[in-house]
Amino acid sequence: MNIILFGPPGAGKGTQAEIICQKLGIPTVSTGAVLREAMKNGTPTGLKAKQYVEAGELVPDAVVTAIIKDRLSEPDCANGYILDGFPRTIPQAEALDAMGVKIDAVLSIELSDEEIVNRLSNRRLCGVCGASYHLLYNPTKDNVHCDKCGGELITRKDDDPKVVMNRLDTYHSQTEPLKAFYNAKGLVKTVSGSETIPEITRRILAELGI
Ligand code: AP5
């Protein structure tokens, strides 16, 4: 099954992807996570992406499309995958079609801009393994270290409120139009992002008929 998790920044795509990929036994492919890793390691892709990510703008289509093309050709993607954060523009969706990828469902997690700003101000990431937490809604045991690997928690640079506003603008102008693109193909299933994490998982699985 090839699934797209769609929605604004901070809607809970990464959180749900991590849970659902374990239930379905397929990998999550997150362009945001790949770009953050590349930036951390100072690779050529990371150096190209840094200015865009930190300003809350989209990395050029050619860069992210190349990442996806490479990643989807790996053996663990043979039985399906969850795309988290890709595609984000119409040209990216067209590039996916051109790769011959057949999408089974686009799950759109919906959340208001106000709730997003509030959520992202309390998000923390593990600086070592990248696991994502929330100080109030998804805390670690001490809200200082990661429960999975013990690494220290950090704040993403692009979770700065000014950058979040820019990410929201970018989402509304460049990414939201994709909903109509996939609606026309009858693939979009909508889930409220305001519920608890387990309730959203339950609704997503129900939408997938699982
Ligand atoms: P990316 O990493 O994809 O960021 P995003 O789409 O902005 O999404 P987030 O990771 O911020 O949020 P999320 O929806 O995954 O929410 P999460 O589960 O963490 O991209 C970052 C940047 O990379 C982009 O801005 C762009 O520059 C670049 N990029 C990436 N892909 C690209 C592409 N295809 N093209 C071009 N550029 C690209 O949840 C958020 C918080 O809320 C967490 O703290 C979580 O614990 C908490 N939470 C989750 N669910 C709930 C709930 N139900 N109730 C309460 N709290 C919850």
Image (cartoon, rainbow, N blue to C red):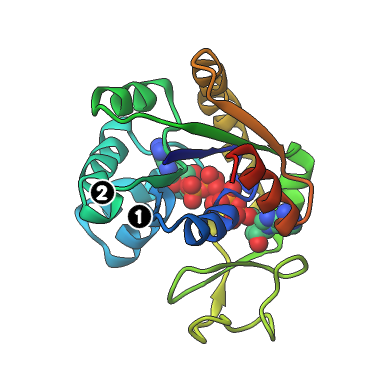
Q: Please tell me in which quadrant of the rendered image residue 134 appears.
A: bottom right
Figure check: 26 above or below 204: below
Which of the marked residues, 1 or 2, is nearer the chain's N terminus? 1
Identify which residue is drawn at 28% across, 66% down: 41
State the separation of the CA atoms marked 1 and 2.
10 Å
Q: Is residue 84 visible?
A: yes
Identify which residue is drawn at 52% across, 53% down: 17
Figure check: 40 above or below 140: above
- Specify whether 97 is left or right of 159: left
Q: Secondary structure at mark 1?
A: helix
x%, y% of residue 70?
21, 45
Q: Please tell me in which quadrant of the rendered image residue 75 appears.
A: bottom left
Q: Which residue is mark 2?
A: 71
Asked if the residue at tag 2 contacts the one at tag 1, i.e. Cβ–Cβ closer than 8 Å, the answer is: yes
The quadrant in which the N terminus is found is: top left
Identify which residue is drawn at 57% across, 76% down: 153
Q: Please tell me in which quadrant of the rendered image residue 147 appears.
A: bottom right
Q: Which residue is mark 1?
A: 34
Q: State the residue in front, 173 or 27.
A: 27
